[in-house]
Image: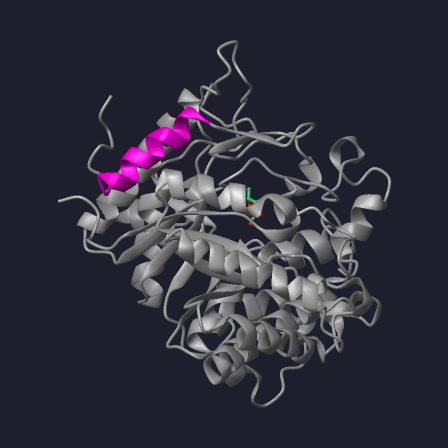
Amino acid sequence: MSFPKGFVWGAAASSYQIEGAAHEDGKGPSTWDMFCQKEGTIWNGQSGDVACDHYHRYKEDIGVMKQIGLCAYRLSISWPRVIPQGRGAINPKGLEFYDKLIDELLAADVSPYVTLFHWDYPYELYCRGGWLNRDSSDWFTEYVRVVVEKLSDRVKYWITLNEPQCFIGLGHQLGMHAPGDKLKFAEVLTAAHNALLAHGKAVQTIRAYSKVECQIGLALAGIVSIPATDSSEDVEAARQAMFSVTYKNCWNNTWWTDPVFFGRYPEDGLKLFGSDVPPIQDKDMKTICQPSDFFGVNIFFGQTIRTNKDGWPEAVLPPVGYAMTAFRWPVSPEALYWGPRFFGERYKLPIIITENGVSNVDWVSLDGKVHDPQRIDFLNRYLLELQKVCKHGVEVRGYFHWSILDNFEWTEGYKERFGLVYVDYPTQKRIAKDSAYWYKEVIASNGAILGKP
Ligand code: FCB
């Protein structure tokens, strides 16, 4: 048996990373537009101003998706493109872009999975306190309603927030992503709480205004532990590590997912964070904990964990010379087994891998093609693990490759290439990489060709 029938084979991208047209057709500035202008923030001073020019080339890009045979495409909507100041006046041209994009996808038989927030936050609202402002969840909801009213006659799958750990942690604690703030931990937790409220209220809004029956989830940055061996002690140590809060930062799962799925913050986190935990109003936890239809999770790698002699989880250093990607992330395929397994067990929801992929040293060969055997091998290994976890009874509904196109990799600029399709930025020419042809076969066979040479 291969993957379940109806398994959704997709690819993903996000607005700021591919659209470009940053100052066109009435789009308002986002915190990423501003952040990229600051000296020293982005590799080689690059920005998403033009990116893949997808705003103008979306038809060509959807043509490639169709050729690959994608069942689905995960896109995100730029809030300041739709509502330039973040609140109030709607930008008809911005909304129209997404309207046409959705029609084009459906005409190509590619199902849209729409992420409502993949980090391009309206700059005007940032000036009013951004996520630190208690009203920020209502601002978000107003925007969500506009999008849902426009697109929900055709869009059935919604993702509220992408990786809250990153836009709060990297953006507000470490200052490495937009808006580039280094707040006190108590403020970081306030911003986090407001983002969680935004998730809950967005779910309510989508359910209230959707014109068709829809499915909703969020996309977590999955922090995955891989047991060092199959012994029950190591498996338990890995499970414990994956679901505990041990540092005063945003890099854990449960501070985000326990409120969303259980309606409470995890005890260990509350204890560790102590007086930094913001005041929680009466109905907050109920608002945050709205029924979800799936557990969306982005998984690129995992960390190996074993039990130490005192019975505590302990990280195992990878062996000397271990395999790593161009981004220097470890190649750890088992993350696509243990991640879905542990998350599925704890939260009891169907899993969707909303992102997985690899940044590789790709260039155009003398023959004019882009040969990326490492990506094919990477995907082969990861997808075999995903297949295994499906066989073991975990309900995995879909897999979205990150990314369809090479794109603007945040602070790394255009240096990291994650695409199935190569983008020659100076000419904006697209070249499907070998991996795109291979993924096409994977999709057509529903995974039956995996592991074959
Ligand atoms: C994830 C982000 C996505 C992309 C990949 C490589 O953390 O959600 O936008 O940058 O990493």
Q: Is residue 301 visible?
A: no
Kindly identify the residue that appears in the image at 64 percent across and 67 percent down: 192
Q: Quarter of the image containing the N terminus? A: top left
User: Is 174 placed above or below 43 here?
Assistant: below
In the figure, is residue 219 to the left or right of 279? left
- Type of secondary structure dominating the magenta stretch: helix
Q: Residue at x 80, y 70 (%)?
A: 129
Image-quadrant location for residue 88: bottom right
Look at the image and give the residue range highlighted in magenta.
Answer: 433-447
- Percent coordinates x, y for residue 335 in the rendering: 38, 43
Task: Name the quadrant of the C terminus.
Answer: top left
In depth, the one of 350 and 116 nearer the eye is 116
Q: Nearer the viewer, residue 30 or 269?
A: 30
Magenta run includes residue 303: no
Residue 99 lies, in percent from the top left, at: 56, 63
Q: How many marks?
A: 0
Q: Nearer the viewer, residue 96 or 450?
A: 96
Colour scheme of the rendered structure: one colour
Q: Nearer the viewer, residue 61 or 321?
A: 61
Q: Position of residue 227 (x, y in %)?
A: 34, 43
Residue farthest to the top, as pictured: 366
Q: Residue at x 59, y 90 (%)?
A: 282
Q: Does the magenta portion include 446?
A: yes
In the picture provided, is 75 more to the left or to the right than 70? right
Residue farthest to the left, as pictured: 1
The answer to whether residue 438 is visible is yes
Measured as percent of width and height from the top left, residue 194 is found at: 65, 74
